[in-house]
Amino acid sequence: MDLATRPYRSVLYIPGSKTRALEKARSLQTDAIIFDLEDAVAPEAKAEARETLKDALQQDGYGKRAKIVRINALTSQWGFEDVRVLRDVGADIFLLPKVNTPTDVDALADLLEPSMPIWVMMETPTCVFNAPEIAAHHRVAGLVTGTNDLTKDLGCRYRPDRLPLMTALQRIVMAARATRGVVAIDGVYNRFRDGDGLKAECEQGRDLGFDGKTLIHPMQIDVTNTAFAPSASEVDLARRQIAAFEDGQASGQGVAVVDGQIVENLHVVAAKRTLAKVDAIAQMAAE
């Protein structure tokens, strides 16, 4: 499946050091997996985790799930070796942490084949301020929000409505949308047993424009996939909007009316995007 058009509703973090988790991930209904060598792996275990992940990627078996490797920062003692060992063993995307400027992306781009997409962690105030320039980098294909790090660096309080983070969240989405269709992924929800809270935060992220959400536990997958997929009523409306607009054009009208609301070309563009997402999700499900 084309990485540019596939769904990214659920993006699950898996520690690169845990063989059982790497095996289990092959059967999970997540759209993408972040194989994490950074925060999820203790310093003394990083070298072993790198080799464990290499073996898992070479064995593959992850189907249509996007395989994203989060390396350690290139300013750390592990980052360059992460890239050297893992750049040719089956990863679809490399995820770079500790990014503050487009120059940080250059450092990773120089180590990878030109065809390898790069995603970046948006996890510092400086990074968020520079979000438009980072997203516009010719190698950047995705922005992943690091809400825990942002909360720490901002010194703001946790609130269920995420009001203290709203400027950062919206700026990340706007930076992604202002460029070449860069993917925008929302941050994690830490209370992984709180299904209602997760549902509310997924719906908020979806309404803000995020393509999906990073997850820390498999039990979060179903709620997230449902929240970031078009609902039956949205699909029905999209089809009726397209049909009404096409009928209007055939009769010389530039607009149509559906459910008492004007439908213009911009609504049709959004409707077709909805149906394309439904098709992409169906392709994932048909694995």
Image: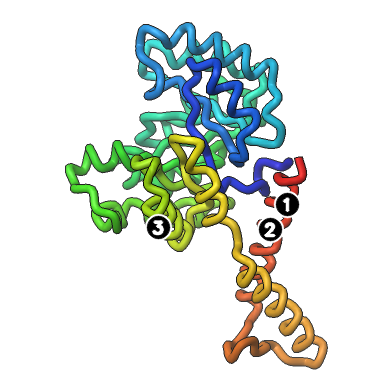
Residue 81 locus on image (x, y percent): 49, 11
Q: Is residue 72 left or right of residue 156?
A: right
261 shown above or below 80: below
Outermost residue to the right:
250
Q: Nearer the viewer, mark 3 or mark 2?
A: 3
Q: Nearer the viewer, residue 182 or 62?
A: 62
| Residue beneath disc 2 | 278
| Residue beneath disc 3 | 200
Residue 99 locus on image (x, y percent): 38, 33
- Amino acid type at circle 2 is Val
Looking at the image, can residue 283 be seen? yes
Mark sitting earlier along the chain (3/2): 3
Q: How far apart are labels 3 and 2 at the CA level?
A: 22 Å
Q: Secondary structure at mark 3?
A: helix
Q: Is residue 238 left or right of residue 185?
A: right
Q: How far apart are labels 3 and 1 at the CA level?
A: 24 Å
Q: Are marks 1 and 2 in contact (CB under 8 Å)?
A: yes
23 shown above or below 28: above
Mark sitting earlier along the chain (3/1): 3
Q: Are marks 3 and 2 in contact (CB under 8 Å)?
A: no
| Residue beneath disc 1 | 282
Q: Nearer the viewer, residue 54 or 197?
A: 197
Give the residue at x 60% y 21%: 23
